[in-house]
């Protein structure tokens, strides 16, 4: 301070300076960039049941007959088996045949439609022709029945020896042939032969009672 300010005040207005010691605290790099906290374990959300499996189980117990059978077909498809395998039997060569049709097939028809009839099944590759001519149908004297009127020697019906004149066609690939006009029945057979969905044809029929009586 200037001496003029201290003149006559010596010892009275002395200024005391206190030594201030600054403490330097070292800073570590990890203090500036703290390590990330360990990630919280995230468990995938628990799935109680596979929705498809749950649906299948419910459908199997609640649906009967054709619906349950179709569901089983879908399961086989998902498991990697051929979805084009016939419902009732496996092909052995060009065709397959069975005279033991499951009850579920009978259940697809009305009681009047199958009463007293013994259903058969002929399965063959779609690339082969059934080789029959038909007659009857709704509005005809046959009262809605579609029957075989002729068997050609170049078709599966003839080569298998299973379908004869007078046999009634009941169903083809799940489509009933009862109470159709003749044109509708012929269209149904044509649609099956040209459809890209299946490689096999499954024909449900019953033998003519007249043929059986003759035998």
Image (spheres, grey):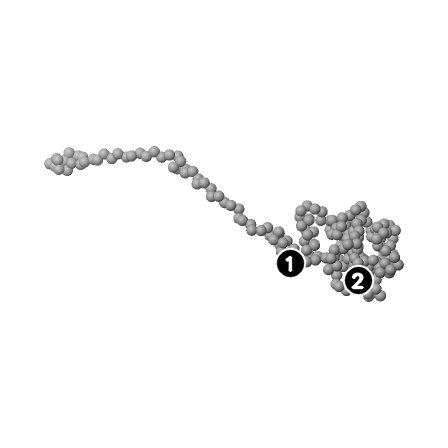
Which quadrant is the N terminus positioned in? top left
- Above or below residue 144? Residue 88 is above
Res. 141 in view: yes
Q: Residues within 10 Å of mark 2 (few under 14, many from 20)?
A: few
Q: Residues within 10 Å of mark 1 (few under 14, many from 20)?
A: few
The answer to which of 154 and 164 lies nearer the viewer is: 164
Q: Position of residue 168 (x, y in %)?
A: 82, 59
Residue drawn 74% across and 52% down? Answer: 87
Quarter in which the C terminus is drawn: bottom right
Q: Secondary structure at mark 1?
A: helix
Whether residue 110 sits left or right of residue 42 in the image: it is right
Depicted 76 relative to depicted 213: above or below: above
Residue 78: give x, y in percent of width and height: 66, 48
Circles 1, 2 touching at the beta carbon (< 8 Å): no
The percent position of residue 36, horizontal first and vertical second, equals: 44, 39
Give the Cα separation between the discs numbered 1 and 2.
29 Å
Foreground residue among 136 and 65 = 65
Q: Which residue is mark 2?
A: 116
> Which residue is at 85% across, 52% downward?
161
Q: Nearer the viewer, mark 1 or mark 2?
A: 2
Marks 1 and 2, the one that precedes in the sequence:
1
Q: Position of residue 128 (x, y in %)?
A: 81, 49
As drawn, the label of residue 62 is: 1
**Residue at image x 76%, y 50%?**
89
């Amino acid at each position: 301070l200037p001496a003029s300010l201290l003149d006559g005040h010596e010892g009275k207005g002395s200024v005391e300076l206190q030594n201030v010691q600054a403490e330097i605290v070292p800073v570590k790099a990890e203090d500036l960039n703290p390590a990330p906290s360990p990630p919280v374990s995230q468990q995938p959300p628990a799935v109680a049941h596979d929705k498809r499996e749950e649906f299948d189980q419910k459908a199997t117990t609640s649906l009967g007959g054709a619906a349950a059978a179709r569901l089983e077909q879908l399961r086989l498809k998902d498991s990697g088996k051929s979805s084009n395998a016939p419902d009732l039997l496996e092909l052995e060569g060009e065709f397959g045949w069975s005279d033991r049709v499951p009850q579920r097939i009978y259940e697809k028809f009305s009681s009047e439609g199958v009463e007293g009839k013994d259903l058969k099944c002929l399965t063959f590759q779609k690339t082969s022709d059934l080789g029959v001519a038909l007659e009857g149908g709704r509005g005809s004297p046959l009262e809605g029945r579609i029957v075989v009127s002729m068997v050609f020697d170049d078709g599966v019906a003839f080569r298998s020896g299973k379908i004869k004149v007078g046999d009634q066609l009941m169903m083809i690939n799940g489509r009933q042939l009862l109470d159709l006009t003749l044109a509708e029945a012929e269209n149904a057979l044509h649609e099956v032969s040209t459809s890209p969905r299946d490689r096999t044809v499954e024909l449900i029929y019953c033998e003519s009672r007249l043929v059986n009586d003759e035998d």
